[in-house]
Image: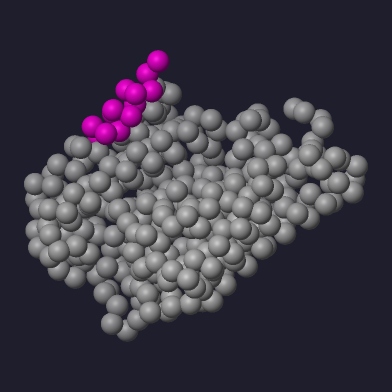
């Protein structure tokens, strides 16, 4: 390991992890407000933006303090951060520029209230900057996986920052993420955002395909690269689903209780599927595990997902799709596996 950079301390990792959580919570609170309280978004100065941007300042301050401290200890500014963290420093001015631009964008062009909120240039700039800021531990240990040692709590910052990165990726796809929006196929009712059943079915299935690929590859990359402790896959998947489903969580006295129960069920289901992956890691071969990550885990999740929907909201999808979704999820996972064969 290179000696020209300062060592990566556990204290610094936890400071990054905690402030990264602050930023991710703020991001999803803002997404929740866009989904549930569009009338509160007439100005840039909202409580949701306050949590988001204070989270950024906290995370940036942790990095800048480490940079200044190490320069004071005699390191040159180019090598004053642990390896992998220089990109995190670059994320600070990028996020700052995106935040200022976002305020100007909102005041001049108005607030985005639909899918355009995900893909405005300033929001994408903020997303890239946030990803750079919070993935320093992931970059470090990806280069030096042998350094990822110690107790469960010593190893937790890598897992959580990797998890936060996946939540950011899914956040910018949440218009089709099945744990966020629920699309009916046999009628246009309270859970519909489009007027035509065909597009509900198509977008719902597209989201299932996308979720299968992202989660399957995430399981595979984390478990192949790192020797995850028992319970870590459950934490990873549970946290990811918690954030993706929370943005659509209805609140208030007139909130849809069935939908609340369904969304809580998704989180418990994800914890269970992650635990199954943890157990498989202890008993199966590496070749068998690749099918668990890419095929077995997504299929198990969507079987449970469809059961939860049927028990809480009724048959949101037609019986034809209910029976076909696990099959197509398995096929997609298998195709991803085949594409990796050398």
Residue at far front of view: 108
Pinpoint residue 212: horizontal percent, then vertical percent.
Answer: 32, 41
Q: How is the image coloured?
A: one colour
Prevailing secondary structure of the magenta residues: helix
Q: Is residue 314 magenta?
A: no
Q: How many marks?
A: 0
In this view, the residue farthest toward the top is: 342
| Stretch in magenta | 330-342
Q: Residue at the spot x=43%, y=38% of the render?
A: 219
Image: 292 above or below 269? above
Image quarter where the N terminus lies is top right
Between 305 and 55, the one lying in front of the other is 55
- Residue 52 placement: quadrant: bottom right
Residue 137 x %, y %: 64, 43
Determine the residue positioned at 37% across, 18% down: 341
Could you tell me which residue is drawn at 38 percent across and 28 percent down? 290
Residue 155 falls left or right of residue 31:
right
Where residue 282 appears, as percent x and y from the top left, is 46, 32
Q: Is residue 333 magenta?
A: yes
What residue do we see at 21% from left, 58% from top? 183
The image position of residue 299, as x and y in percent, is 27, 40
Above or below, 298 against 46 in this view is above
Q: Is residue 215 left or right of residue 147?
A: left
In this rendered view, identify the residue nearer to me: 56 or 43.
43
Q: Picture quarter containing residue 200?
A: bottom left
Q: Residue furthest bottom?
A: 253
**Depth order, front residue of 156/78:** 78
State whether residue 19 appears in this view. Answer: no
On the rendered image, what quadrant is the C terminus found in?
A: top left
């Amino acid at each position: 390991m290179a000696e020209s950079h300062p060592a990566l301390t556990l204290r610094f990792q936890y400071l990054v992890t905690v402030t990264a959580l602050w930023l991710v919570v703020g991001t999803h609170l803002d997404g929740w407000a866009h989904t549930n309280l569009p009338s509160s978004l007439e100005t840039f100065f909202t409580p949701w933006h306050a949590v988001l941007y204070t989270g950024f300042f906290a995370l940036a301050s942790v990095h800048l303090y480490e940079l200044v401290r190490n320069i004071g200890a005699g390191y040159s500014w180019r090598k004053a951060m642990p390896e992998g963290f220089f990109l995190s420093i670059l994320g600070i001015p990028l996020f700052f520029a995106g935040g200022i631009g976002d305020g100007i964008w909102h005041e001049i062009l108005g607030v985005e209230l639909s899918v355009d909120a995900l893909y405005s240039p300033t929001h994408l700039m903020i997303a890239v900057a946030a990803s750079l800021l919070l993935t320093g531990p992931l970059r470090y240990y990806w280069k030096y996986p042998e350094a990822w040692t110690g107790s469960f709590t010593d190893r937790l910052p890598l897992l959580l920052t990797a998890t936060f990165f996946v939540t950011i990726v899914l956040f910018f796809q949440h218009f089709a993420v099945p744990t966020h929006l629920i699309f009916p196929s046999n009628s246009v009712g309270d859970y519909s955002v489009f007027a035509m059943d065909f597009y509900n079915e198509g977008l719902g299935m597209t989201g299932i395909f996308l979720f299968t690929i992202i989660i399957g590859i995430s399981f595979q990359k984390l478990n192949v690269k790192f020797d995850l402790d028992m319970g870590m896959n459950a934490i990873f998947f549970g946290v990811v689903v918690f954030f993706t489903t929370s943005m659509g969580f209805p609140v208030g006295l007139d909130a849809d209780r069935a939908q609340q129960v369904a969304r809580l069920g998704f989180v418990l289901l994800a914890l269970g599927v992650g635990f199954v992956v943890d157990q498989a890691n202890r008993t199966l071969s590496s070749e068998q595990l690749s099918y668990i990550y890419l095929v077995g885990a997504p299929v198990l999740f969507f079987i449970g997902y469809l059961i939860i929907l049927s028990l809480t909201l009724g048959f949101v999808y037609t019986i034809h799709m209910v029976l076909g979704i696990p099959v197509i999820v398995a096929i997609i996972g298998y195709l991803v596996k085949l594409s990796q064969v050398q």
